[in-house]
Amino acid sequence: MVLLFVLNNTCDAQEKDKPKALKEVTVTAKMPPIKHKIDRIIVNVDGMITAAGSNALEILSKSPGVFVDMDGNIQLNGKGGVLVLIDDKPTYLSAQDLAAYLRSLPAGMVEKIELISNPPARYDASGSAVINLQLKKNKTPGFNGNMSIGYNQGAYARSNDALNINYRHNKINVFGNVGYSRDAGYSRETSQRNYDNTSTTLLDRRYHYSSNGYNLRAGIDYYVSAKTTLGILLTGGIRPRSDQLNYNSDQLNADQKTDSTAIGHTTGDYQWYTGGINLNMLRRINEKGSSITGDLDYVNIHVNGSQYLSTNVYRLDGNLSSANEILYRLPADIDIWSAKTDYNLPLKGNANFEAGFKSSYVSTNYKNSWLQKAGSDYVPDYGRSDHFIYTENINALYVSAAKEWKHWAIKGGVRMENTRMHGRQPGNIVIADSAFKRNYTKFFPSFYFSWKADTSGNHTITISYGTRIRRPSYQQLNPFLFYNDRYSYTTGNPWLKPQYLYAVELKYDYKSTFGVELAYLKVNNLIQFIVQPVGDVFVNRPENFGLNYSFNVVSWLSADLVKDWHVNAKLIVFHLINKGMADDQIVNNKINSGELEISNQFRLSKKWSAEVSGLYATSHLQGQTKTDPFWHLNGGIQKMIMKEKGTLKVSVNDVFYSMIRRDNTTAKGLLARRMVETDTRRIGIAFSYRFGKDTNNRKRNHTTGGAAEEQGRVN
């Protein structure tokens, strides 16, 4: 930000009549990387130096309180099943596909991240918490924008590039984002499975993948009048992907001697396409801020893929015992329609009223074919093939009211959601037709109460209560048996029920620099993948595991320790209790866990800055699996160039290559140990540049799209 000041030097009376010289004084205002508000935390992505050359998933994993495991599952403050939104719109993807999509979204396209631990009634009730990624958009008159180019290298190279442009003239505003991502990585997994001391399986897996992601977002706003704006937003993406898995295993008998050896490999090629259109309207009713918004959304996702699997089993003498070849064809089509409207009414005395309605309809069609090698041909295995058709209609209403006094503030609301769902498996020559239906209505209240303990408002205490729902993902309801390797299968469960979260949180905040939060969480019908050993094969199947209780303590610090040294730190400690049934066994587990995140930012000079960040996590518990502690350290340096319109960043992630997962799984008659290494140690370099006018102007934020919760459940 550049301000021109007229400096009037009046030291000498004779100089009063001389022409006054204009001197330019540059005042640089740096946006804080992390900002704490009463109901959410806002992360400024451009302020994260270690985001150099990275993607949206990597910057999300570095945000306070966010934990992303190696399978792509996202947690916020210890809460799993988080609803991830892009500009208040869901992605309509499973955890694995969402992780792949976020890897294909360059960090240069993301402006900020909102972390909402206990969302209010205006948000969809789905998900234990909400994470909203706001993409970049400028409303400054004229032509402007920014670009970013990023590259990082580990065992494999990755690239993340983005171009954001905007042009506004009179009543028309045109904007767009284009992104490209080259993603590649590997994992190496070694595991040992012991079955009732009668046999042991030693498994060594090598996995490699590569993909190219292309994302497009373009729109037009038309300012009909000072009070009315109409807009259209188009989104699209293409992500071709390929992968390869090679594994070998030894089967040991009770005397720990080798009985047989299996060698196998899997190759896959996949195509993923998505396209969407959003029609939106904003009407400002009066000067006091009353407004009504409306959105119509349509999203289509098409997936087409195939996998080839081959396994050979050899006897101890080296002769071939059995051979198996399988070909998968995995097409899927998802159509999503959504309509939404929100009404906001400010009232006298710092009060506010909100209400809204949303209706969504989702249709999914999975037609997965299992073909078995017979001679030189592949023949359909109708007993294992699958055609799954699923439709779902959710209608929601909400009301919310808020009131502020000098020291007190209160906000409350309730959201009602009615869900109608229908699943069907058309039969074939082996499998009979099957279907299921459900229709249920639930209410989701939320309540917030805050108190400013002093006249300056430095000390604030907030208590909140909320209820949430996590519906099964569409693919989790599909009973199709998916072959991972010779010893691992994954299948769905059409009888899954939604899980419900009840949360009470008490928070203390001091000037948005220090805070402590106490939380109690209870989850009914907890959905988790349960391991069911069938012979020497793992079958992973989602089940309503039971109950989950969690007592959390979250503490954070965001302050300057000394001049030019800013620290963001977060400590999460929670006591977790799991009670449920797994494969007809009673499970009653307890664990104390914690996570410590620290980010240090150093201003070295006017144009130079640096960052060092790290994380340490103790043991975690999820269903039947306990994960060992791990940690990692990141570093980066940044320089402002080209009259401070350009930025050059260099970063190193997981410097000591310590992000190695080790876990233990206990099931009926089974004890399994596993270690997984991935491509986490990387060096990155990134360049970004702003062009056009930088004048701040009031923005219309495209964050009211109606396609809210459904996209996060595609798979």
Image: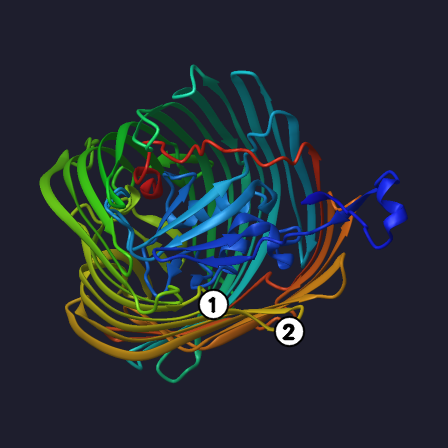
543 left or right, relative to 249: left
Q: Residue 667 is drawn in which quadrant?
A: bottom left
Q: In the image, which disc is placed on residue 154?
A: none
Say whether disc 2 or disc 1 marks the residue closer to the N-terminus.
Answer: 1
> x%, y% of residue 466?
21, 56
Q: Secondary structure at mark 2?
A: loop
Which residue is painted at 12% across and 46% down in the image? 443
Of residues 464 and 23, which is closer to you in this image?
A: 23
| Rendered location of residue 19, percent (x, y) | 87, 38
Around disc 1, counting alpha carbons within 10 Å, would you say few (fewer than 14), some (14 to 19), or many (20 or more)?
Answer: some
Circle 1 sits in a helix, a strand or a loop, which is it? loop
Count the numbered circles shown: 2
In the displayed structure, 423 sits above or below 586; it is above
| Circle number at residue 656 | 2
Q: What residue appears at the point 38 percent right and 60 percent down from the top-left corner?
A: 75
For the view shown, which residue lies furthest in the bottom direction?
255
For the residues carrying marks 2 and 1, which lies nearer the camera in this image?
A: 1
- Which quadrant would residue 313 be assigned to in this image? bottom left
* Image coords of residue 711 (percent x, y): 35, 38
Which quarter shows the C terminus? top left
Label for residue 513? 1
State whether residue 659 appears in this view: no
Dot 2 amino acid type: Phe
